[in-house]
Image: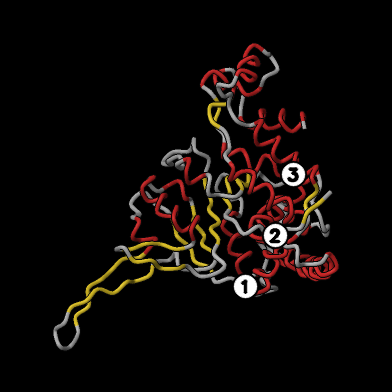
Amino acid sequence: MSAFDNNSVTGDEIVAEADNAVNRLEKVQAAIGNVIFGQDLVVEQALTTILAGGHGLLVGVPGLAKTLLVETMGKVLGLEDGRIQFTPDLMPSDILGSEVMDRSEEGKRSFRFLKGPIFTQLLIADEINRASPRTQSALLQAMQEYHVTIAAKRYDLPSPFHVLATQNPLEQEGTYPLPEAQLDRFLMQIDVLYPTLEAERRILLETTSTKNNLVEKVLSPQELQAFQTLVRKMPVGETVVDAILNLVHAARPQSNNKEELQNKTDPNDITKHIAWGPGPRASQALMLTVRARALLQGRLAPSMDDVLALAEPVLQHRMALSFSARADGINVRDVITTLKNRI
């Protein structure tokens, strides 16, 4: 069985929209691939994040083209982009904007709001974990509610609005961990790994020559928003829905009900390693991203493969392990892999 989010939309209409979207998205991936080499999975996950209407956190060591990827995506998708380089002395007003006092020719004084760099369609938050938690949290309201409040006044952000943040590994010097509430606002954590030998060979040859790969604009913001709406119309089978719910619930720590307390002595019970787990926002994120991934791959409906492929990027930043689990050398990816194997 499957269900449509909008009962007034017929299956034939969705198929026609999906066919057009698939053709356009193939051109998007090809245009990005002309600039970004050897990071096909990262590109797919970043596009999945945008198609699902969310924000992404790209994590990796310096020099892996994280910033270049975001800049390239902005140009290909036709989005107005802005960049903020996060530093320890960055203040919230440097992101959101601030009020300044104007004085008219008659001598009358009034306040005027100067918009900050957050007022853009695609915000590149570069090295977000180099700023203090106070400054990091300046993005919270914008990422969830798509507006900011300055001096009790509401200012709406452009539409669409997405944040793609880059982050260095937390163990590097001069970095701060992101607050849990902000991590939960990121639809996915995208791990950017080192390229393969063949991919790095291509990078070496093409980026040190006189060849200049131009970035081609493929979509408009209006087309992108239409595809985002299409993602929410796509049918999802009950099997996939059940898998999402079971996976997210299994990633939460033990509660106090009697049935779960009996599992405390079970050596195969993985929840004893979990200090805190994902909330309902993780289920919502999986529901949207599996649809978006299916559309990117030319399919009308998501499958179990999509759930398994996106479990780690959606869940890993929404979980923390107990001290004893970390002391035993267990990490979050190990726990998620075990949960995936069980569904």
How far apart are the alpha carbons under marks 1 and 3?
30 Å
The type of residue carrying mark 3 is: Val
Residue 186: x and y in percent read 55, 49
- Front-most of residues 158 and 229: 229
How far apart are the alpha carbons under marks 3 and 2?
14 Å
> Is there any visible trace of residue 84 in the rendered image?
yes
Residue 119: x and y in percent read 45, 68
Report crowding for label 2: few under 14, some 14 to 19, many 20 or more residues within 10 A (C-alpha): many
- If you read the primary sequence from the N terminus, does the residue marked by circle 3 or circle 2 appear first? 2
Residue at the spot 71% in from the left edge and 41% down from the top edge: 244
Element at badge 3? helix
How far apart are the alpha carbons under marks 1 and 2?
17 Å
| Residue 241: image tag | 3
Please name the residue that numbered disc 2 is placed on.
232
| Residue 221: image tag | 1
Q: Which marked residue is nearer to the observer: mark 1 or mark 3?
A: 3
Element at badge 1? helix
Q: Which marked residue is nearer to the observer: mark 1 or mark 2?
A: 2
Residue at the spot 58% in from the left edge and 64% down from the top edge: 71
- If you read the primary sequence from the N terminus, does the residue marked by circle 1 or circle 3 appear first? 1
Residue at the spot 68% in from the left edge and 73% down from the top edge: 223
CB atoms at circles 3 and 2 under 8 Å apart?
no
Report crowding for label 1: few under 14, some 14 to 19, many 20 or more residues within 10 A (C-alpha): some
Residue 250: x and y in percent read 66, 30
The type of residue carrying mark 2 is: Arg
Horizontal arrangement in the rendering, residue 170 relative to residue 341 (left or right): left
Residue at the spot 59% in from the left edge and 60% down from the top edge: 70
The type of residue carrying mark 1 is: Pro
Report crowding for label 3: few under 14, some 14 to 19, many 20 or more residues within 10 A (C-alpha): some
Q: Residue furthest bottom?
A: 105
Q: Is residue 151 above or below residue 288?
A: below
Element at badge 2? helix
